[in-house]
Image: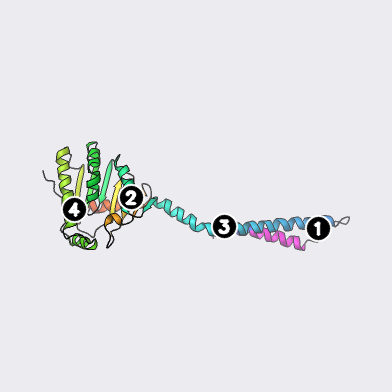
Amino acid sequence: MKRKNIVQWLILLLGVILILFATFFTHSPPDSSGVSIGLNTILLSIGCSIIAVVIINFVEYQITIPEINILKFIDSWKVVAIYDTRQEMNAETNKLLEKAEELDIAAFGCKGLINYQGEVLKKRLKKGMKIRFLVPDKDSDFVKQREADENATPGEIKKTIEDLISWINDTRVSLSLANDQIEIKKYSCLPVDSIMRIDGELFTGPFMVKKVSQLTMAYQYRSGGKGYSYYSSYFDKIWSDESISSYIPRTS
């Protein structure tokens, strides 16, 4: 039994004892019966008040405990926000990218990121930002299946991945970047959830059938919580496992 419950039961017992004592206490001083009646009333009032407080506290605790548990859960995972779509999420990620030092991203091609934030990424790369891209093998069955799931044109996602690779290679050359400043790996396992880690903020969301990625929901986690640790570690494990991921060669 929890300590809080034990304390409540002890206080409740005290209230019951006071009521019983007030009920059965009938002794009166020889010169006056009024004193005895007054003591009974006082003990009865105190006992009833104690029981009332315990009952109210118990009911309130039972009502609020689910909310308390939810708040504890959210705090332990450091859930910052849940977005209806990744389009809504982009407003937050775009602000973070303006000052980003590190970017890890697992996706099917990052078409929107490159089209709308490509120049921002280049500015940050000039200032030393590091980027790691993790994409599925463009020739895998998973990519073909994703094209079918999104009702995309056959070869569309494959071309998106190829365009990302070309952008990375062109950016490396144009900015004279070191090999480890912007990296890309392909993996052969089942596609991971969409993951974007921008310094101490991490965004993730599922890939859904009959929905393009920008129209699926997304979650935001902050560093220091279980969510951030879980997904950033997951990304690192796939990145470092040579049996399922490998570097896409740099071209000049």
| Image-based side of 45 in relation to 94, left or right | right
Q: Main secondary structure of the magenta part?
A: helix
Amino acid identity at mark 3: Glu
Q: Nearer the viewer, residue 13 or 147?
A: 147
Which residue matches tag 2?
A: 89
> N-terminal of the two: label 1 or label 4?
1
Mark carried by residue 230: none
Q: Residue 138: x percent and y percent?
A: 16, 56
Which residue matches tag 1?
A: 37
Give the distance between the C-alpha atoms of the residues marked 4 and 3, in whole angstroms. Answer: 55 Å
Which residue range is magenta in the image?
12-28
Question: Which numbered disc, 1 or 2, marks the residue closer to the eye?
Answer: 2
Which residue matches tag 4?
A: 160
Name the residue rendered at 33%, 50% in the picture: 89
Question: Which numbered disc, 1 or 4, marks the residue closer to the eye?
Answer: 4
Q: Residue 228: x percent and y percent?
A: 34, 50
Q: Nearer the viewer, residue 160 or 131?
A: 160
Label 1 crowd bin: few (<14), some (14–19), many (20+), radius 10 Å: some
> N-terminal of the two: label 4 or label 3?
3
Give the distance between the C-alpha atoms of the residues marked 1 and 2, in whole angstroms. Answer: 70 Å
